[in-house]
Amino acid sequence: MIAGMEEARFGVAHLDRVALHYAEMGPEDGPLVILLHGFPDNCLGWKNQMPALAKAGFRVIAPDQRGYGVSGKPRGVKAYDLDELAEDVVALGKHFGEEKLRVVGHDWGASVAWWLCSTKPEHMEKAATINAPHPAIWKNAMYTDKVQRKKSRYVKAFRLRVLPEMMIRRKNFDALVEALKGSARPGAFDDAEFDAYRKAWREPKAITSMVHWYRALLKKKLPAEPARIETPVLLIWGEKDEFADVALAKRSIALCERGGTLFFAEGTHWVHREEPQAINDMLITFLRSDQE
């Protein structure tokens, strides 16, 4: 068992559209909080947040998003369009009896949270996004921003067929493991975690489905100027992110009518692993703010 996840309850939510495996902590009658992981993570990536949020009284659900682990893996790139990913979260909330959602996302999970705020605001109570800009800002910057163009070279490589999957699977996913270690501060990942990750990555169709998230984004037409966001948003950002420039964070939060920020000068893309105490305290304050 991964340290921090000893108290987790695991289950599968059989939604109309897809089945999602999830980890759960906290009282079943507590306010629902959905935690959305990114690439190439899964629900275990929230091991530092789930116990703290559960102790604070929240019912915490961290799904393996579609395409990951033992969750459903629909065929084809279109199945991983942002609209599909956002609808999964709405359906998951309804599965647990909630129409208005509190969502915390990291990386791709944060992209989904941003998209929910932009396209399904009627379902959003509030959102916290960790080290991912609004997807429309991110995609535009891949082509127009010199700094981000360099940071996003790997994304454009994912549009190729078959080759990315072959490279990822080589030598028992060593390149993926080294990419995680190399983009985080020492100690952010426990070596024991990588056994669990490799097991998840070996699931049939998992790697192709995970890469399809990027392929779908590259094909999607996104607004040049995203609309203003009314949902309260907390943006958390490690400024030493190798994959997304801090300027994109500032452009994203500027979209928000009610936006707050928490920047970490020495944080990386994996800042929620590196600064869990400060981030957990802020998340609890933010998520509780509508209950007082």
Image (tube, helix red, strand yellow):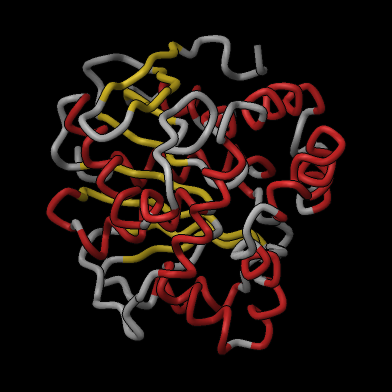
Quarter of the picture holding the C terminus: top left
Answer with left or right where residue 106 lies relative to residue 66. Answer: right
Image quadrant for the N terminus? top right
Of the pair 109 and 200, the residue shown nearer to us = 200
Residue in the image at 69% along x and 65% along y: 154
Q: Position of residue 32 (x, y in %)?
A: 27, 30
| Apparent side of residue 242 relative to residue 247 in the rendered image (left or right) | right
Residue at (83%, 51%) from the top-left corner? 182
**Looking at the picture, does residue 25 appear above or below residue 112?**
above
**51, above or below 129, in the image:** above
Locate residue 68 relative to residue 145 in the image: left or right: left
Q: Would you place residue 154 above or below residue 198 in this image?
A: below
Q: Is residue 209 above or below residue 49?
A: below
- The reply to whether residue 29 is visible in this rendering is yes
Left or right: 95 as drawn, with respect to 23: left
Q: Position of residue 86 (x, y in %)?
A: 30, 50
Residue at (44% x, 54% y) in the render: 77
Residue nearest the viewer, comparing 261 with 163: 163
| Residue at image point 21% right, 50% down | 124
